[in-house]
Image (cartoon, helix red, strand yellow):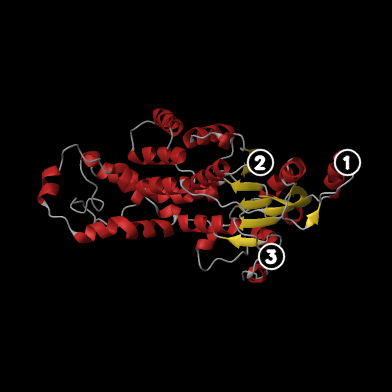
C-alpha cells in the first residue's frame, strides 16, 4: 500500500461510517483489494486485527489459537506477508542476555552460509519474504553480463590478419613514390549486438515486475546499447530513466512515467506500436529482443500473430521469458500464448535468481536461431482444452 491507498481508504470510511463492522470490511475491501490474490491477505489482516486489537504489541502467533470464542477457531497458517506486517519489531536490547547465555551451535553456522544462499537462488520471487526480497535485490545488482561479440560488416587494421586492405595499401605505397608496396591487412570488427527488453507490467505480472525492473536496470548499467520498454495497455519507453546510477531514483522516475501499472494487457496493440514507432530505431545491427510476459492477452490475441512475426523477422534473436514456466504442467494453450509461441527463438522461465543467472549465460553465447525443444512447445500450443 502506498499513501494514496491510505488516503482513499480514509475518505471511504468517512463517507460510510463505523456503525457496522461488515460495512467497514467491504468499504476497505473495495478500496484496497485490486486483484483476486489480494483477497486472502486482506481477509487475514482484517480479522486478525479485530480478534485482538493489541496484535501490534506482541509477537504474531498462529492466528491467536489461545483466543476463546463461541465458535471453534480454525488454525490456519497465516500468510507470510501478514505475519511480517503485523509482527512487531524486536525492541533494542530485548533478549540480548538470552542470546549471550546460549552456546553457539554448528548447525546454525551451516544454515547461514551456503544452504541459505542456495535456497534463495531457487526460491520463487512470489514466495519470498521482505528480507529475502532485499537479499535478492542485492544479488541482482551484483549480476554481470558477459558481452557476446558478433561479427560486423566493418573492418579494423590487424597486421596478423589474412585479408589485405587494398585501399590502405595503395595509399601507403603512394607515400614512398610506389618504389615499395607494404601490404596492410585487416580483420572484421566485432561488437556486441543491441539489447531490447519489452517487459509486461500488467496485473498478472505485478508479482515479478519490480524484480524484473531491477534486472533491467542492472543490464542497462552493465552495458551500452540497451533499450527498455514496459507495456500493459500502452507502450512506454523507459530507457532514459534506467540510466540513473541510483536504482531507487531510476524506479521512482519509472513509476512517475508509467500510468498502466497492474492493469490489463494488450500485447498485440503494444507490439504494433513498437513495430511502427521504435523498431527501425532500436532493432538495427542484429538486436536481441527479450519479451517478458505471461502471454495472457485481454484482446484474446487479436493481431498478435502478425506483430510477433514482424518482430521476429526484424531482430537477431527473440527470447520469450515467461514466469508461468515455473509450473511443470504449464501448456501454452491461451489465445495469446498460441499466437506467440510460433514466432520466438527460445522460451525460458524467469521467476527466481537462478533463472536470471541462466539468462545471463544464454545472452553471452552465440546460439542457433531456433532453440532445441521449441517444436514441442509449438505442438503443445495446438492442443485444445476440452
Of 34 and 185, nearer the camera is 185
**Is 215 positioned to the left or the right of 43 in the image?**
right
**Is 175 positioned to the left or the right of 354 in the image?**
right
Q: Secondary structure at mark 3?
A: loop
Q: Is residue 360 above or below residue 379?
A: above
The N terminus lies in quadrant:
top left
Q: Residue at x 47, y 35 (%)?
A: 248
**Is 74 positioned to the left or the right of 235 in the image?**
left
CA gap, disc 2 and disc 3: 27 Å
CA gap, disc 1 and disc 3: 50 Å
Q: Secondary structure at mark 1?
A: helix
Q: Nearer the viewer, mark 2 or mark 3?
A: 3
- Badge 1 crowding class, 10 Å Cα cut-off, few under 14, some 14 to 19, many 20 or more, is few
Q: Quadrant of residue 330?
A: bottom right
Residue 205 visible from this viewpoint: yes
Mark 1 vs 3, N-terminal side: 1
Residue 135 shows which numbered tag? none
Mark 2 vs 3, N-terminal side: 2
* Image coordinates for residue 86, horizontal then vertical, percent: 29, 43
Residue 174 shows which numbered tag? 1
Residue 315 visible from this viewpoint: no
CA gap, disc 1 and disc 2: 56 Å
* Image coordinates for residue 165, horizontal then vertical, percent: 82, 50
Outermost residue toward the right?
178
Q: Secondary structure at mark 2?
A: strand
Disc 2 target residue: 235
Q: Quadrant of residue 238?
A: top right
* Image coordinates for residue 313, horizontal then vertical, percent: 76, 55
**Is 90 positioned to the left or the right of 155 in the image?**
left
Of 230 and 346, nearer the camera is 346
Q: Is residue 20 above or below residue 370?
A: above
Disc 3 target residue: 370
Amino acid at each position: 500500500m502506498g499513501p494514496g491507498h491510505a488516503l482513499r481508504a480514509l475518505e471511504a470510511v468517512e463517507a460510510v461510517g463505523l456503525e457496522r463492522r461488515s460495512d467497514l470490511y467491504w468499504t476497505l475491501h473495495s478500496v484496497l483489494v485490486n486483484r483476486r490474490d489480494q483477497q486472502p491477505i486482506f481477509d487475514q489482516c482484517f480479522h486478525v486485527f479485530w480478534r485482538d486489537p493489541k496484535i501490534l504489541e506482541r509477537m504474531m502467533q498462529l492466528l491467536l489459537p489461545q483466543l476463546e470464542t463461541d465458535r471453534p477457531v480454525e488454525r490456519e497458517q497465516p500468510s507470510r506477508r501478514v505475519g511480517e506486517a503485523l509482527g512487531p519489531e524486536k525492541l533494542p536490547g530485548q533478549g540480548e542476555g538470552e542470546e549471550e547465555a546460549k552456546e553457539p551451535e554448528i548447525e546454525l553456522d551451516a544454515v547461514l552460509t551456503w544452504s541459505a544462499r542456495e535456497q534463495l537462488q531457487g526460491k520463487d520471487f512470489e514466495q519470498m519474504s521482505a528480507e529475502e526480497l532485499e537479499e535478492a535485490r542485492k544479488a541482482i545488482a551484483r549480476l554481470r553480463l558477459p558481452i557476446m561479440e558478433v561479427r560486423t560488416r566493418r573492418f579494423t587494421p590487424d597486421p596478423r590478419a589474412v585479408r589485405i586492405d587494398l585501399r590502405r595499401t595503395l595509399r601507403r605505397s603512394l607515400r614512398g613514390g610506389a618504389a615499395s608496396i607494404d601490404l596492410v591487412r585487416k580483420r572484421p570488427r566485432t561488437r556486441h549486438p543491441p539489447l531490447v527488453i519489452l517487459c509486461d507490467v500488467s496485473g498478472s505480472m505485478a508479482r515479478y515486475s519490480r524484480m524484473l525492473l531491477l534486472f533491467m536496470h542492472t543490464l542497462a548499467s552493465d552495458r551500452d546499447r540497451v533499450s527498455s520498454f514496459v507495456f500493459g495497455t500502452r507502450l512506454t519507453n523507459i530507457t532514459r530513466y534506467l540510466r540513473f546510477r541510483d536504482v531507487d531514483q531510476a524506479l521512482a522516475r519509472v513509476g512517475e512515467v508509467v500510468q498502466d501499472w497492474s492493469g490489463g494487457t494488450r500485447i498485440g496493440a503494444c507490439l504494433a506500436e513498437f513495430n511502427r514507432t521504435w523498431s527501425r530505431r532500436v532493432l538495427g545491427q542484429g538486436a536481441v529482443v527479450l519479451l517478458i510476459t505471461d502471454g495472457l492477452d485481454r484482446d484474446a490475441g487479436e493481431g498478435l500473430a502478425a506483430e510477433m512475426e514482424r518482430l521476429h523477422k526484424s531482430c537477431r534473436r527473440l527470447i520469450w521469458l515467461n514466469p508461468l514456466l515455473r509450473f511443470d504442467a504449464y501448456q501454452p494453450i491461451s489465445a495469446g500464448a498460441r499466437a506467440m509461441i510460433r514466432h520466438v527463438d527460445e522460451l525460458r522461465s524467469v521467476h527466481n535468481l537462478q533463472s536470471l543467472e541462466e539468462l545471463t549465460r544464454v545472452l553471452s553465447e552465440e546460439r542457433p536461431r531456433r532453440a532445441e525443444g521449441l517444436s514441442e512447445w509449438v505442438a503443445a500450443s495446438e492442443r485444445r482444452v476440452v
